[in-house]
Image (cartoon, rainbow, N blue to C red):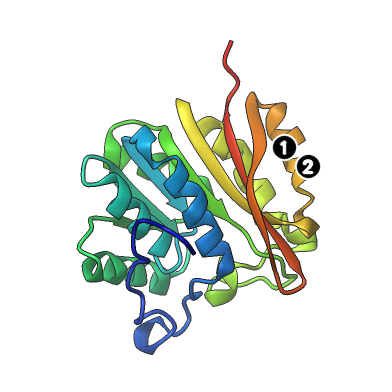
Amino acid sequence: MCSAFPTPLYSHVGRGDFRDVYEPAQDSFLLIDALEKDAERLPCVCLEVGSGSGVVSAFLASVVGPSAVYICTDVNPAAAGCTATTASCNSVSLQPVLTDLVRVHTHTHTHTGKSDADLLVFRQRVSSMQSRGIEASWAGGERGREVTDRFLPAAAQLLSQRGLFYLVTIAENHPEEIVELLGQRGLEGELCSSTRAGNERLSVLRFSRRQT
């Protein structure tokens, strides 16, 4: 990754109490690159759904600074704890929240006093496995879209009027379908960046509200 800001420290991820937390990989770093490009927009409320290690939000907090609120949700208790440790290791303030997708709205309002996000981040990996442990960070069911499709309606509601929504996909997710689906909910999508990781083509889609 070529960046003006250093990659957050994360040597604790995948070890000890956090051995069941997904370690940052190429999808994380591709997303970090994409986020840095738009960091000058200085969002007030940043929400990462499925934060895992917390590395992405920690990077964002180091770029944007303490003026914003950083909420990091995950269904895995170890991931929430790992996110807190990542924040401490990198001297940034993150707010890890243990919750499922359907309750994100409630927690966003609780922590910020508003129910929308200026910057929304979500990653989903492909697998047919289902779990609430480490596999929950990347298991996606058929086409890798089971969790994503649950979240998309919430994403359209959560995004503020001037907000940006970043979604990491691979080819099996059929990203063009996702762009079409969110287009029906008033969001315009575009390919922000992409790279090849082994046999996968990773892409970051960026969505914003259609301006009238």
SS of the residue at dot 2?
helix
Q: Is residue 39 above or below residue 62?
A: above
**Left or right for 63, reference 211:** left
Question: Dot 2, crowdedness within 10 Å: few (<14), some or many (≥20)?
Answer: few
What residue appears at the point 24 percent right and 71 percent down from the top-left corner? Answer: 89
The quarter of the image holding the C terminus is: top right
Task: Residue at 72%, 37% (x, y): give it.
Answer: 179
Q: CA distance from mark 1 to mark 2?
A: 5 Å
Q: Position of residue 99 (x, y in %)?
A: 43, 56
Residue 131 versus residue 178 in the image, above or below? below
Q: Is residue 190 left or right of residue 106?
A: right
Kindly check if marks 1 and 2 are in contact, taking CB atoms under 8 A apart as contact: yes
Q: How many marks?
A: 2
Please state which of residues 7 and 88 is positioned toward the viewer in this rendering.
7
Looking at this view, name the residue that lies furthest to the top.
Answer: 212
Q: In which quarter of the view is residue 142 placed?
A: bottom right
The disc label shown at residue 138, or none: none
Tell me the number on the disc at residue 179: 1
